[in-house]
Amino acid sequence: ANTQLQEVTAQLRGIDEQMRAYVEQLRRFTGDTTITGISDTSFTEKTVMLTLDSSLLANNPELTALRSQIDVASKEIRVERSRLLPDFSIGYFNQSLVGNHEKNGTEKYYGAGKRFQGIEAGISISLFAKAQKARIRAAEVNQQIREAQVQSFYFGLTQRGNLLLAELRRLRIQLDYY
């Protein structure tokens, strides 16, 4: 009996030390140095839903980030496809030439007030589109990879949630037993 008393006393000291360490961790995480301990010592049973809520899974931040990568991949496809379209350009220039310049065989002086203006227009069409089509296909494959990653992550999240719920049910049965 004396040995058991010493064991329980040692366990109690160990638990007190753990509690002090956890309180210190709580102080560090919250940045609140006024926390001295845990004042509530009464335990109340909380009801826990024993079903997996799909809305909680859908709002998972990591899943949301993966879904946003699908949007980025679809926009990459649009960008790569737009590079196959013709490119139109139009420009305006205004220039002054100061000094003597030859025009039609005669020398003529142009001062700072004499300006030359013009416009230019152009169209560029891709003649060799094989490389660009390969980039489009690569962007499409990238989007498919992202979609597969989302499905895989969602499946893993669902499986993990089901395992945790099964563990909760098991612990609930043990708690009800006692």
Image (spheres, helix red, strand yellow):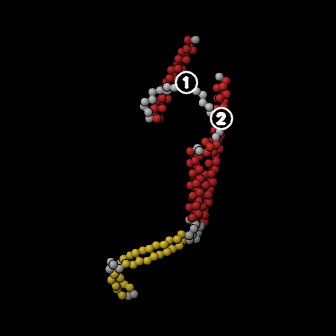
- Badge 1 element: loop
Image: 85 above or below 11:
below
Q: CA distance from mark 2 to mark 1?
A: 24 Å
Q: Which mark is residue 50?
A: 2
Quadrant placement of the C terminus: top right
Q: Quadrant of residue 60?
A: top right
- Badge 2 element: loop
Quadrant placement of the N terminus: top right
Image: 158 above or below 7:
below
* Kind of residue sitting beneath label 1: Ser
The number of callouts visible is 2
The x and y percentages for residue 176 are 66, 25
Name the front one of labels 2 and 1: 1
Q: Quadrant of residue 93?
A: bottom left
The residue lying toward the viewer, choosing from 56 and 102, is 56
Please indicate, yes or no, whether residue 156 appears anywhere in the rendered image.
Answer: no
The x and y percentages for residue 67 are 59, 50
Which residue bears the numbered disc 1? 42
Label 2 or label 1, whichever comes before in sequence order: 1
Image: 169 above or below 157:
above
Residue 82 falls left or right of residue 109 = right
The residue lying toward the viewer, choosing from 101 and 131, is 101
User: What is the residue that sits farthest to the top in this orientation?
Assistant: 1
The x and y percentages for residue 27 are 45, 32
The x and y percentages for residue 97 are 36, 78
